[in-house]
Amino acid sequence: MPMNLDPQEPRGPDALVTGARTAGCSNSQLQRLGPLGNEGETPPQAVVLGMHRSGTSVLTSLLDRLGLYAGPDESLMPANDYNPRGYWENSELHALNEEMLAALGGSWTDVLGIDPKRLGDAERARFLPRARALVRQLDSYGPWVIKDPRLCLLLPFWSELLERPFCILIYRDPLAVARSLAQRDGLPILVGIALWEHQNLSALAASRELPRMLVGYRELVADPAAVASRLVRTLKACGVRESGRLRELSSSAARALLDRSLMHHAAAPDEHLGYLNARQRELLHALESCKALVEPVPPLSAGAREVLQEHAESLLAARHTAVALEHQRTSSEQERDGLKAELHRMQQAVASLEHQRTSSEQERDGLKAELHRTQQAVATLEDRLTLSVQKCGDLSTELRLEQRAVAERDALLASVFVSRSWRLGFGVKRLLGFPWGRRVPTAFERWQSLGD
């Protein structure tokens, strides 16, 4: 049977709280103590169910501190500005839930069509092995706890795999949740409130046949040690034997898990009239009085369904716009890549032409150097030719002078040879040489031979 806490309305400050899981924290009260260990049988399997921004992280950190192990640090999603002490959320669980929501055609903000029973055989065959492996891994630590707001929508899938489940539902004022979502995700306030209603109704319906308890966010913030005591007592009442091994938690250690510097988004009761419809106010009252655990789960209010339907349509339009923009981006990138390829080809062509130009310039420079050398050789030859011409002219002049001198001597000799005195002397000389039997050429004969 479902278990209920004291129905007295929790009171206390409305604060944004997160868990601390860093083992090296300077405050020893924030250090993790590790798992209790497995004694050979299936350990208690705690599931935290709550809307986003409702304190699920700090509640899980509290359970981890008690001994319901959330897993090793490396398996938990990292902290960020919104949860500076960590989400206490198993990264594999988160990934699986995101994939299942996508397979069902929705998301954590597009929830109207989410029903794990709609998963096809092929999809279940894809998800079940990973889910079973995660459960087996967690079972090896002993008592454990998992947390992900998406479990409110997907608990029917996970509960099939759990042998000893125990659900801990946590709720927070819907207006505070919606304001926190508006700051973190930019969701309109009415959308945040409608999601709060849908998420809490889904969690109540999915956990109806399971052992469970309900925790108020304000109660958790006001007195976390008291909540820890109630958790242990409820586990005992449910027959969870391992509850006797759960750790004790002092008030100071419990309060050290809260980050009171992040208190905001509190909502005054009279503000609800301006945002919550009648069905949402009734659900909030049922949660505060714990009647929600025993009363039938009502259907989603018409106002919330209308808001969520309009939000889904806006998401679909946004997705279509995103697809169109993605198509344009892809086309632009393809065009850009084509232009880059064309530019590359042109650059290669320019480089080739530049190489040819460089080769031509080098060839031109070589030809110019060769031309210069040829011109120098021609100039040298021209100088030599000029000198030769000058020398030839000088020789011609000298030849003419020599020829003139020869002509003058020839004329002189001719006049001598025809003179009477030469002829008489020539005859005498021949007579004198006759007795010796040798004949010496005369000067005339030698002159004639020169002329020939």
Image (spheres, helix red, strand yellow):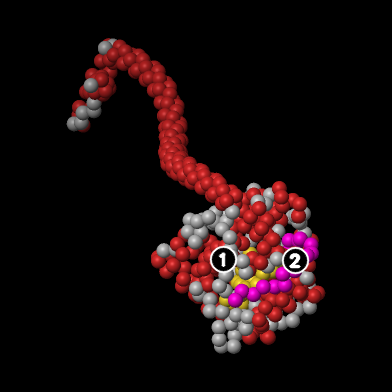
The x and y percentages for residue 36 are 65, 83
Q: Residue at x 55, y 86 (%)?
A: 41
Q: Crowdedness of circle 1 by 10 Å Cα count: few (<14), some, many (20+)? A: some
User: SS of the residue at dot 1?
Assistant: helix
Mark yes or no: residue 101 visible.
yes
Q: Amino acid at mark 1?
A: Ala
Q: Residue at x 58, y 60 (%)?
A: 298
The x and y percentages for residue 205 are 56, 65
Q: Residue furthest bottom?
A: 39
Nearer-the-camera pick, 436 or 73: 73
User: SS of the residue at dot 2?
Assistant: loop
- The answer for how far apart the CA atoms under marks 2 and 1 are is 22 Å
Q: Could you tell me which quadrant the N terminus lies in?
A: bottom right
Q: Could you tell me which quadrant the C terminus lies in?
A: top left
The x and y percentages for residue 287 are 67, 64
- Residue 436 belongs to the span the image colors magenta: no
The x and y percentages for residue 245 are 68, 85
Nearer-the-camera pick, 47 or 408: 47
**Residue 285 position (above or below residue 166):** above
Mark 1 lies on residue: 205
Mark 2 lies on residue: 9
Contact between labelled residues 1 and 2, with CB atoms less than 8 Å apart: no
Q: Residue at x 62, y 57 (%)?
A: 197
Q: Amino acid at mark 2?
A: Glu
Choose top left, top right, bottom left or bottom right for residue 178.
bottom right
- Magenta span: helix, strand or loop, mainly? loop
- Residue 7 belongs to the span the image colors magenta: yes
Residue range (magenta)? 1-26
